[in-house]
Amino acid sequence: MYRSGAVMAWNVFKFCTALRGLGSIMILLVLAVVGVSYYAVVITNYGPGLAAGGFDSLIAFLVLVLFHCLLVMLLWSYFSVVFTDPGGVPCNWRPAVDEERGDTDPLTATEFPADPENSRIRFCRKCSQLKPPRCHHCSVCGRCVLKMDHHCVWVVNCVGALNYKYFLLFLFYTFLETSLVTLSLLPQFIAFFSDGEIPGSPGTLATTFLAFVLNLAFALSVMGFLIMHISLVAGNTTTIEAYEKKTTPKWRYDLGRKRNFEQVFGMDKKYWFIPGYTEEDLRRMPALQGLEYPDLDAQGF
């Protein structure tokens, strides 16, 4: 049994190391897909269409404007996820004590909480530190992440409390952009299977065909992923928590769809579709910092 456990631990370690090594490759892959799409839509098909005149020029102009706007938001959201720390546990963090409710400091031991049955107070043996509520250890990053959702190889980062909104916006704008590219290249794709002659060099035709197939595949896959995360936000849960609470009749952090949504996107509607928060939201909503979360128990439900 010991040998089997050691082999399993070693395999997991090698798997996590491989994921870390994929970092720059995945970023380059994302940029390559963007480059192929840009070449097919802007350079090959709709850029030259601006000089056609009439209704075709108007359609080309609208497609190009929408394409570039969505591309800017996609890349802004993507690199916000990549470069934003998902949130780590501060040094010497201790849970807050609510004296008005009669709570006392449960941390009388140096390694473990004195009340091991209190699920709100957890200890990470790998990091040798206390874990705030909704915090989990990431084997890929090698540390505890606040409100960890998952480790995403596409963004080369953990998705946690401080960058979850940016990740959702990345999915949202990726779905819109890939759907736009798919629809805009659909006439050219259909033309591949017609008997008529298709204008363009073999290279441009191949790029158009590849861009259509790639964007269609990404649009369908991201749509499913986006729907899943919308349901998670509506219930104020994460991917990890959704798996852990399968047998839980009532989720303690589910405060209603409106408040659940605001705990991810903030209260200022002008910033809902931008990868960022207002200073006011960060000040009055501790949940955006990843350390404190209102729950039904604290509100007497």
Image (tube, rainbow, N blue to C red):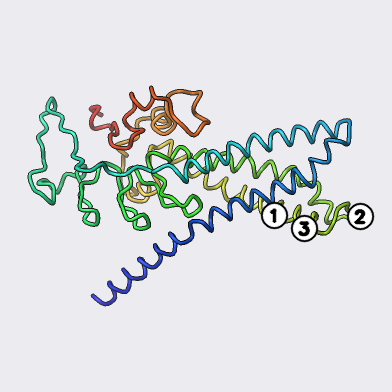
- Nearer the camera: disc 3 or disc 2: 3
Q: Is residue 33 left or right of residue 243?
A: right
Q: Which residue is mark 2?
A: 197
- Earlier along the polypeptide chain: callout 3 or callout 2? 2
Q: Which residue is mark 1?
A: 213
Residue 11 position in % (x across, y down): 36, 70
Q: Is residue 26 left or right of residue 37?
A: left
| Residue occupying image coordinates x 88% and y 53% | 198
Q: Nearer the viewer, residue 25 or 239?
A: 25
Residue 62 position in % (x across, y down): 75, 32
Give amino acid for label 2. Answer: Glu
Task: Say few, some or many: other residues with alpha carbon within 10 Å of mark 2 (under 14 / 14 to 19 / 20 or more).
Answer: few
Residue 291 position in % (x across, y down): 28, 37
Give amino acid for label 1. Answer: Val
What number is the disc on residue 111?
A: none
Element assignment for label 1: helix
- Decide if residue 1 is in sight here: no
Kindly report the distance in space between the C-alpha atoms of the residues bearing marks 3 and 2: 15 Å
Q: Which residue is mark 3?
A: 206
Kindly report the distance in space between the C-alpha atoms of the residues bearing marks 1 and 3: 11 Å
Residue 296 position in % (x across, y down): 27, 32
